[in-house]
Every structure is written in structure tokens, then in C-alpha cells.
Image: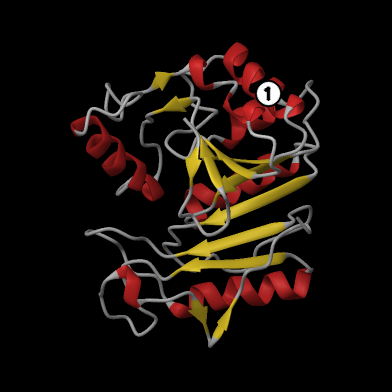
Amino acid sequence: MSTKSKIEWTEQTWNPATGCTKISPGCKYCYAEVMAKRLQAMNVKGYENGFNLSILPERLTEPLKRKKPTIYFVNSMSDLFHEEIDDDFIEQVFSVISQASQHQFQILTKRAERLAEFFDNRKIPSNAWLGVTVENKEHGLSRIDYLRKVNAKIRFLSCEPLLEDLGNINLKGIDWVIVGGESGAKARPMNTEWAENLQRQCEKQGVKFFFKQWGGWGADGKKRPKKANGRELNGRVFNEMPMNL
């Protein structure tokens, strides 16, 4: 089902699939896994299998029923390009996206190679934003090159959880960068300098920058409740989006 989202850079979540498997360090303390197990314990429909992958075709038409223009985050509780989701189902998801032209759809994946392969000979709807997670150098930076191969109207990076300084990165062809620290009881800290480095590079290269959260650690390097951490980076709130909506 689609639900109103607390994620700062979107409005609604739409999960035609739930559950996933871990493939890189950014997955270690996955918020979706914790949430899925909680929803399973509450007997919420769609989470009978906990965080094991579940395909939910009955949810496909949900965005078509909503007339108000909305920003949807697709598969916030999974990864649309997971190896166990077949091409036919992904095509159905993008068919709905094409039909629901009043909305904007944000699709984020860690499986960037499959993303590029899938769209090698397929047209991307103009209202689909495609993004990859870039949590560190070893696993994240190579995903940017795969993302550049897809001809999406908007390409974006989610550097959350940001686990190290990414150094100098090539943002050519990238429209938007989201940065955030990790949340949750076992959150790993994010250094201020890592976030500042990305903000400066976005400004220099003309890329929109969105600072989402400090997460479980404050800018002062002390662990504290998320609600106490705020969203300011050097006294500023960065809410930049890649297009006027």
C-alpha cells in the first residue's frame, strides 16, 4: 500500500514489493529490515514474510487511484532491481509510472549494474527519477558510472548512510545528491567534514544538494536521539530539489 512518508525528500511511499537481501556495508543496519519485522509482528498485510522478498502485484495500481500530483518513493521497503524480481514485474511497475503522469516517482537502488542493463533498450518514463546509493568509495562510487548510462530525466545519489569521506567525485550527469547519517540503535557516526565535502562539490558542479539528517550521532560527534540532531549543516538547512514541483 502507499502511505504518507516521514522521509524528508518525498511525500508518499509505494511498495509493490517488500523485503530484500544485504549486498554492501550500507545495508548492515537496514532501517527497512527493522521496520518489516515490526510490521510482521503487528500482522500488517504484505509483511507476512518479514524481510524476505515478497512480490505484491495487488499494489501495482495504487498510484493510479490518486489524482493529486504526488512524489512517490518506490520500494522504500525493498530494492526494485533485486535479482529475484523478474523483468516482467519491473516492466509492470514502470508501466504504472508511465500511466500515472501526474506523479513523480523516485527509484533508488544499490543494484546499479542491473539498472543499467534493464534500461539498455527500454525507454524511461519522464516522471521517473533514478538513483543509486553511494555509502562509501569501494561499493558506492562505481554505481555512479552505471547510473550515468541510463537516460533518465533526473539522476540522483543517496549518500546515506554516509560511512566515509568520498573524496573528489565526478558528478557529471547527476542532478541531485542526498546526504544523511545513519539512524537506529547501532548507527555508525558521520563526520561533518564528509558531508561538507559533498556540499561543496555539489555547489561547484551545479548539482542540487539535500541534507536529510545527522542520524544517531550529532554534528559534535556525540550519540543522541535523532530528534535532537536537527537537519542543519554549518547552520544551514539544505532542501534543494532537482526540479520545481
Q: Residue furthest left?
A: 41
Of the pair 58 and 66, the residue shown nearer to us: 66
At 56% from the left edge and 78% from the top edge, which residue is drawn? Answer: 196
**Residue reaching furthest to the top:** 88
**How many numbered discs sit on the rendered protein?**
1
Q: Is residue 13 above or below residue 19?
A: below
Whether residue 118 sits left or right of residue 135 in the image: it is right
Residue 75 image position (x, y, % from top left): 50, 34
User: Which residue does the image show at 57% across and 26% down from the upper left?
Assistant: 62
Where is residue 172 shown, x and y percent of the image?
A: 78, 57
Give coordinates of residue 96: x percent, y percent: 68, 23
Q: Above or below — where is 71 with respect to 165?
A: above
- Which residue carries the number 1 mark? 96
Position of 32 with respect to 159 (left or right) is left
Toward which corner of the image does residue 52 lie, by quadrant? top left
Colouring mode (rainbow / by chain / secondary structure / one colour)? secondary structure
Q: Quadrant of residue 65?
A: top right
Asked if residue 93 is positioned above or below residue 135 in the image, the reply reads above
Q: Amino acid at mark 1?
A: Val
Seen from the viewer's position, the closer of residues 182 and 95 is 95
Which quadrant of the figure has residue 51? top left
Q: Secondary structure under badge 1? A: helix
How dense is the environment of label 1, judged by Cα within 10 Å: few (below 14), some, or many (20 and up)? some
